[in-house]
Image: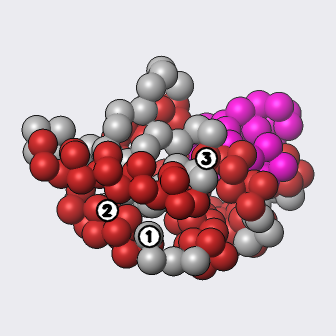
Amino acid sequence: MSLEQFNQAPAADAKQQIAHCVAIADWSEALVAARPFASLASLLTTANALAGEWDAQALNQALSAHPRIGEKAQGTGKEATLSRGEQSSVNADDLALKQALQAGNAAYEEQFGRVFLIRAKGRSGEEMLSELVRRLANDPQQEQQEALQQLREITLLRLKETFA
């Protein structure tokens, strides 16, 4: 679907077109309601502004669709396919990395009560592990802000790729 088609589509169809970007229904509805967009840049600006309103509840809603770093996303939907591709830099044959990510994920979930979220695209498995270890030193408020920033990056990247 092109940006022009997105602008002209019925609301339900337009929401379906961007559903894989993030599992936050209010964001999708608000973005669709803000149509039409004159350009991809204006769409991304509006999407970013709307994402700036996310809070802990929105983060938890979105995390329901994200796999752990280093684990393959389950399912056949577009979001699962994107997650598998985004995490493709994690070498499944590197047992030490896989074990370190599993341990880090467990420590993170115990400390913060949610799945560790990071924009995986463009990062190696080692870089993601390093960020995981670094972020374990955050207090809960700092970590919530970092996780929300990562979620915004993932969402905008996916949105941009949808209309590229």
- Relative to 90, say whether 126 is above or below: below
Q: CA distance from mark 2 to mark 1?
A: 12 Å
Residue linked to disc 3:
63
Residue linked to disc 1:
136
The N terminus: image quadrant: top right
Residue 137, how many percent across, how many down?
45, 77
Query: Residue at 11% of width from left, 45% of height from top?
Result: 94
Counting residues from the start of the chain, the first of labels 2 and 1 encountered is 2
Left or right: where 147 falls relative to 120: right
- Is residue 95 in view from this perspective? yes
Say which of marks 3 and 1 sits in front. Answer: 1
Q: Is residue 64 magenta?
A: no
Tell me the magenta residue range.
Answer: 1-28
Residue linked to disc 2:
128
- Is residue 32 in view from this perspective? no
In the image, what residue type sits under mark 3? Answer: Leu
Residue 141, how many percent across, how many down?
66, 76
